[in-house]
Amino acid sequence: MKYIIAIIKPFKLDEVREALGALGVAGMTVSEVKGFGRQKGQTEIYRGAEYTTNMLPKVKIEVAASDELAPRVVETIQQTATTEAIGDGKIFVIDLAAATRIRTGETGDTAL
């Protein structure tokens, strides 16, 4: 099993969610986060006032997937979330040692 963490631009969330649903992903966790990478922040205008921020709003998606499904999940996120501009985000894949469904006690891939 793999634990996939993707940091993407917020306006891409619905597209990514729909694409992963079509792929057969049964669930995911989504968090609103802030951070920066090579972009190093930006200058924005809000209600006529210019301000600089060094932490940009992003969305973090977390998905647990079987070893067979994980490469397609990564590919789907990458293709769906790209704008081909700096700041599109990152995808991290981590080995997942165990998963247990609390309600039934199922473990492993069946818990996903």
Image (tube, rainbow, N blue to C red):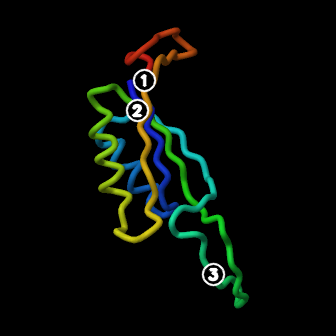
Q: Residue at x 56, y 58 (%)?
A: 58
Amino acid found under the numbered disc labelled 1: Leu
Q: Which residue is mark 3?
A: 44
Mark 3: give few (<14), some (14-19) or many (20+) Cα within 10 Å.
few
Q: Quadrant of residue 48?
A: bottom right
Amino acid found under the numbered disc labelled 3: Glu
Q: Nearer the viewer, residue 25 or 35?
A: 35
Amino acid found under the numbered disc labelled 2: Ala
**Comes first in the chain, label 3 or label 2:** 2
Horizontal and vertical percent for residue 84?
Answer: 34, 69
C-alpha gap between disc 1 and disc 3: 41 Å
Q: Residue at x 52, y 9 (%)?
A: 105
Where disc 3 sits, the SS reads: strand
Circle 1 or circle 3, nearest the eye: 3
Q: Nearer the viewer, residue 92 or 57?
A: 92
Q: Residue at x 38, y 24 (%)?
A: 1
Look at the numbered discs 2 and 1 and tell me whether their residues touch, using CB distance below 8 Å: yes
Q: Which residue is mark 1?
A: 112
Q: Which mark is residue 26?
A: 2
Where disc 2 sits, the SS reads: loop
- 104 with respect to 48 (left or right): left
Q: Which mark is residue 91?
A: none
In the picture, the quarter occupied by the C terminus is top left
**Comes first in the chain, label 2 or label 1:** 2
